Image (cartoon, rainbow, N blue to C red):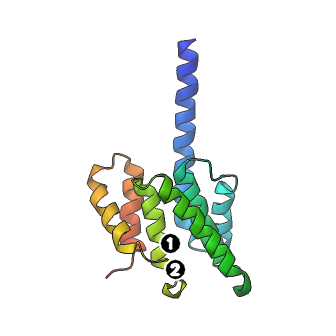
Amino acid sequence: MKNAILFVVLLGSISLFAQSTAIRKAYRDATKSEEKAKTFYNLVDDVSQSDKAVMVAYKGAGKMLLARYAPLTKRKPKIKEAIEWIEKAVKADSDNVEIRLLRLSVQENLPKFLGYNDNIEEDKKFVKDALPNIKDKELVEMINGYFTEFSKKK
């Protein structure tokens, strides 16, 4: 019985790891085209606000990516909803480096006139300070990749 429970737990952990790998890769690719943004969003579409905070943040980031392709007249409410999802995730787990990286990536790449840019320096410092202590090699690669390819230099 213990072996069966252990097997189920391990299988769930492997499945969760594979899912996070796919989501991280899809998020990075989602910035390249509307089709890839939709593909990414399909991975997080079923996430609810009661799910793990990091998944809530990914859904908010996905909503933001899709807002980029919405008609101008429909963008503002979509952006507002995306921000609400991201901020809910930050509020639920403000010490989560991945959530803070997601918020940073959105804020740095959103036009400044939209006013969602108050946490750029705070999140950048938080993520960089946390980097040496992160055990998840894939997350470290994601962070380094973001700072190399996407982050705006100041």
The residue drawn where x is 52% and y is 35% is 13
Q: Which quadrant is the N terminus positioned in?
A: top right
The residue drawn where x is 30% and y is 66% is 125
Query: As drawn, which residue projects farthest toward the front?
Result: 91
Q: Which residue is mark 2?
A: 110
Residue 138, relative to residue 32: is it above or below? above
Residue 85: x, y in percent? 59, 62
Residue 11: x, y in percent? 56, 31
Q: Amino acid at mark 1?
A: Val
Count up the numbered dots: 2
Instruction: Tell which of 39 and 126 is nearer to you.
Output: 126
How would you rate the neighbour count of disc 1 (Cα within 10 Å): few for under 14, some for 14-19, many for 20 or more?
many
Does the image show residue 3? yes
Q: Which residue is mark 1?
A: 106
Q: Amino acid at mark 2?
A: Leu
Whether pointer 2 and pointer 1 mark residues with C-beta atoms closer than 8 Å, the reply is: yes
Residue 54: x, y in percent? 52, 53
Distance between mark 2 and mark 1 Cα atoms: 6 Å
Residue 150: x, y in percent? 43, 74
Element on which disc 1 rests: helix
Q: Quadrant of residue 56?
A: bottom right
